[in-house]
Image (tube, helix red, strand yellow):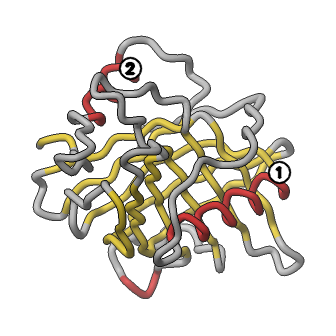
Amino acid sequence: MAPADFSRPACRLPLFVTALIAAFIGGCSSDQGTLHLISQDGRHELIQKFSQAYLARDETGDADIVLIQDDLQPSRSGCAMPRQLIHIRIFWTPMTGVKPDHPANTNAAINWCLVCNNSDHPGVVEYRGSGLVEVEDSSDGALVTIRKAWMKAGCQHGQLVDPLGPSILHGSFRAQRDTGQVKAIIAEIKAAAAPNTPVQAHSAPVEQPKNLAVDTNN
């Protein structure tokens, strides 16, 4: 299975996912979350670690969850690696024993946005989909498990391309409660994915979390 390459010739990002995998295996701290996006033909895979995840609930109990990873170094060609942004909207809580393979059991909408902010070769690829997501609340946040989600490219513009096509997403992570961070990242995703909107760097840094651990056994 080959790592996904989101580059166009004008902005070569030489298999940036390979670098991410190497960094993950090479001894990063445990305060991370990792998600796997695998093409349905089994030929390509994006394995992305996330250093930040936040959760907010509205008055009805529905949950919004965001993940962010943006501390990636420029490639040798000088093009900045894509900033990773994910928004998960939970609409209802599944009962114990619900199977992830039945379409009627999907309870969440998911948007995964990759943004290259290089001034010469900006670009965006946004994957959209739905799936079965479980949230186990705790006093300081929640354990979030994406059992299975079906994703496909919803928009693309600039110098990034979609190498995956229809894909399957899964993974687990811990999220902290922070309504402000959730609203800010949702707004950034919507702005980046809007048609004919120029890509630009986010206006303010996102705070680092106190705790974020990954459970990759699901």
Q: Is residue 119 visible?
A: yes
Whole-percent x and y of residue 104?
Answer: 43, 87
Quadrant of res 182: bottom right
Q: Is residue 150 visible?
A: no
Q: Amino acid at mark 2?
A: Ala
Identify the residue at horizontal 38%, vertical 61% (top origin).
125
Q: Which residue is mark 1?
A: 178
Identify the residue at horizontal 50%, vertical 44% (top origin).
83
Identify the residue at horizontal 61%, vertical 26% (top origin).
31
Whole-percent x and y of residue 65?
Answer: 66, 59
| Image side of residue 74 versus residue 1, left or right | right
- Check the picture and name the quadrant holding the N terminus: top left
Q: Which residue is mark 2?
A: 23
Quadrant of res 158: bottom left
- Do labels 1 and 2 touch, CB within 8 Å? no
Whole-percent x and y of residue 47?
Answer: 34, 41
Q: CA distance from mark 1 to mark 2?
A: 28 Å
Whole-percent x and y of residue 18?
Answer: 25, 30
Q: Is residue 151 above or below residue 70?
A: below
